[in-house]
Image (tube, rainbow, N blue to C red):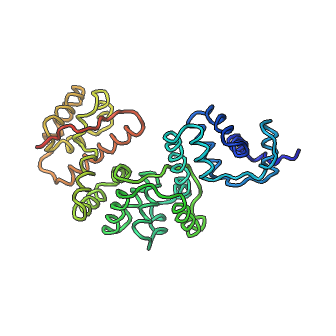
Amino acid sequence: MTNATAELTGTQKVAVVLMNMEQQQAALVMQQFTDTEAEEITAEIVRMRRVESHVAEQALTEFHELTLEDRLNSRGGSDVAAGLLEASFGSERATGVMNRVTASMAGRSFEFLNTAEPSQIVTLLEGELPQTIALVLAHLRPGLASAALAGLTDSLRTDVAECIAAMGPATPEAVRIVAGALRLRSGGLVAARSATDVVGGVRPLLDIINQSDVATERALLAGLEERDPALAEEIRALMLTFADIVKLEERDVQLVLRGVDPANLALAMKGAAAPVIETIRSNLSERNRELLDDEIANLGPVRMSQVDDARAAIVRSIRDMEADGRIVLTRGDEDQYVD
């Protein structure tokens, strides 16, 4: 037997077998897999669409499953995958699995940009509509997307932010068209890397803003405030701020403060609310409180922009630690503090 299936993964072979089975029979098999396994198999069914007969024959022979009569030129695609999932898991669960598969596959269309420099992405997107730029940035990891967003003009940046916030799930066909055009235009500028999920809405926009520098964050929020006050207010309400340090457990506060220079901490605390100051002081060692008091005593008047920059550095540390799972931040509708 020639080795026609040598380049197929185990998941792809399972997909080929299921594509050659009657749907009811395939459904019984699919029910034995976990959701994660079912998603991987479904993704392969969608990708393959059609399988050459000799490949299908060898896959079926290898698995010792069904005869090949009248079903060697298998058909795949979204409809086949969706029908198989619904027969296997029921409509509601099938929809969830299919949505996750579609999102993951669409996100992979832009993975070739994950190794690009932000300036290269900005150049690549030059002249594109805000909706197109939003589609691309929403598929990138937040840090890269925020850096690219910072490279846009103020007006275009606001347009793109609005589009991301209002964007629903993109159709796979639209994603393929945009990604294909950009890949051709990039001329192999960047190589493929890890995939990201499809995103859209206020939360991914917030993730992008949270990764931005202070200047970009201010400019973007100012632009949104002028264009869409309600959206700007919603984002501000969700954004992580210096005052959110009171929402951390004591152990987590201590972990955050451990890497902060006393001079920068004193600057960040300038004009902070009493609960914030108390949270910080109570989680410092006696020696570090003394150092902090010395810095505060010698501080004098400072520009608000300096205070913002100092707070932003601490907030960025909190975001990074939360993303890494080192600390846990409780988000909710807690009362806000005022000076």
Q: From what the image shows, is residue 223 above or below residue 107?
A: below
Quadrant housing residue 173: bottom right
- Left or right: 290 as drawn, with respect to 196: left
- Left or right: 3 as drawn, with respect to 169: right
Tell me what residue is drawn at x 41 percent, y 65 percent: 131
Q: Which residue appears farthest toward the bottom when viewing the image?
A: 127
Quadrant housing residue 9: top right
Q: From what the image shows, is residue 104 above or below residue 327?
A: below
Q: Where residue 51 sits: x, y (%)?
A: 74, 53
Nearest the viewer among 133 and 86 is 86
Which image quadrant: the C terminus?
top left
Q: Where residue 83 sits: x, y (%)?
A: 60, 46
Q: Where residue 93 sits: x, y (%)?
A: 51, 39
Nearest the viewer among 256 and 110 is 110
Number of callouts: 0
Tell me what residue is drawn at x 12 percent, y 50 percent: 301
- Left or right: 184 as drawn, with respect to 318: right
Which image quadrant: the N terminus?
top right
Q: Where residue 142 sits: x, y (%)?
A: 42, 51
Nearest the viewer among 75 and 170 is 75
